Amino acid sequence: MLANILSTQHTYFEALAKSWLVSGATAFAVWANGEPQLCWPSPATAANPSLKENLYLGGFSIGELRVVGRDDKAAQARLQAEAELVAQLIQSTQNLHIVTSELID
């Protein structure tokens, strides 16, 4: 499900990355299963994040948002809020797919 969101909402994640980079971060990334899924400017730059927040779906971690170069409380609060929004986006997309499948059946 995360891979689907990353591909269909790439522009949104790119905007998040750009806003982090403008605010002083040196990298922003989305990771899953220990591997980078999307990363700005490159995957190697987000290997050791200064901040990270898990993305939860149904109580299970399905990935994480990572930021390098910022470690203040405001940045942590922002990343946490963004992770919650991304998780809501994933949940809504999953619910839409379920309803669509039920309608088709």
Image (tube, helix red, strand yellow):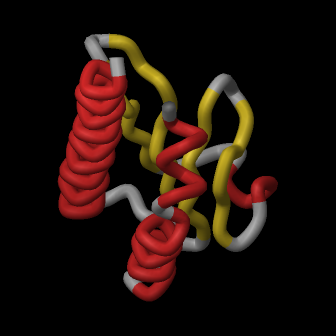
**Residue 103: where, in percent of width, then height?**
26, 26
Q: Is residue 30 above or below residue 70?
A: above
Looking at the image, the residue that sits furthest to the front is 105
Q: Is residue 3 left or right of residue 42?
A: left
Q: Nearer the viewer, residue 3 or 78?
A: 3
Q: Nearer the viewer, residue 25 or 7?
A: 7
Q: Nearer the viewer, residue 1 or 86?
A: 1
What residue do we see at 65% from left, 55% from top? 38
Q: Nearer the viewer, residue 42 or 7?
A: 7
Q: Is residue 31 above or below residue 76?
A: above
**Residue 88: where, in percent of width, then height?**
22, 40
Q: Is residue 30 left or right of residue 12?
A: right
**Residue 24: where, in percent of width, then height?**
45, 80
Looking at the image, the residue that sits furthest to the top is 59
What residue do we see at 34% from left, 26% from top? 104
**Residue 74: where, in percent of width, then height?**
19, 62
What residue do we see at 61% from left, 31% from top? 32
Q: Is residue 61 above or below residue 94?
A: above
Looking at the image, the residue that sits furthest to the bottom is 22
What residue do we see at 34% from left, 17% from top? 105
Numbered-mark total: 0
Q: Looking at the rendering, which quadrant does residue 56 occupy?
A: top left
